Image: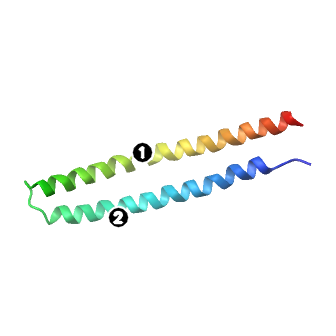
Amino acid sequence: MKDKTAEVAGLQILLPAVMILVVTAIGAGFGVQVLGDVRDDMTTDSAEYNATVAGIDGVGNVTSKFGIIGTMIAAMVILGMLAAFLVFRFRS
């Protein structure tokens, strides 16, 4: 009988990782929207305005890396499933 534990474990890891990325992206989107509203209430040459602009740029830099993070998670799951397959194949 073939053991499917490795395949199921690899797929079970993928769902929480995707959920974390989606929730983080939604939170970052709301954060940028709030920072944009706060920035609009500030005077242009104030320190508060510059701080909100820096915050918006920082959140934008983090969210631009979500594609890379998702690719790395998928690669780790695939490599883990491949390694588990090879271990179970040569074990028996």
Q: Is residue 27 above or below residue 74?
A: below
Q: Quadrant of residue 48?
A: bottom left
Q: Which residue appears at 75% of the width and 48% of the height?
A: 7
Q: Is residue 87 above or below residue 19?
A: above
Q: Amino acid at mark 2?
A: Phe
Residue 36 relative to residue 90: left or right:
left
- Residue 7's disc number: none
Of 68 and 51, the residue lying toward us: 51
**Residue 82 drawn at (x, y percent):** 72, 38
Q: Are marks 2 and 1 in contact (CB under 8 Å)?
A: no
Q: Residues within 10 Å of mark 1 (few under 14, many from 20)?
A: few
Q: Which residue appears at 22% of the width and 66% of the height?
A: 37
Q: Which residue appears at 47% of the width and 42% of the height?
A: 68
Which residue lies most toward the top here?
90
Q: Amino acid at mark 1?
A: Lys
Picture quarter with the C terminus: top right
Residue 49 relative to residue 70: left or right:
left
**Residue 46 drawn at (x, y percent):** 9, 55
Q: N-terminal of the two: label 2 or label 1? A: 2
The residues tagged by marks 2 and 1 sit, at their Cα atoms, a distance apart of 17 Å
Residue, disc 1: 65
Residue, disc 2: 30
Q: Number of labelled discs?
A: 2
**Residue 89 drawn at (x, y percent):** 84, 37
Q: Which residue appears at 64% of the width and 52% of the height?
A: 13
Residue 67 relative to residue 46: left or right:
right
Q: Residues within 10 Å of mark 2 (few under 14, many from 20)?
A: few
Q: Quadrant of residue 29?
A: bottom left
Provide the secondary structure element on which disc 1 rests.
loop
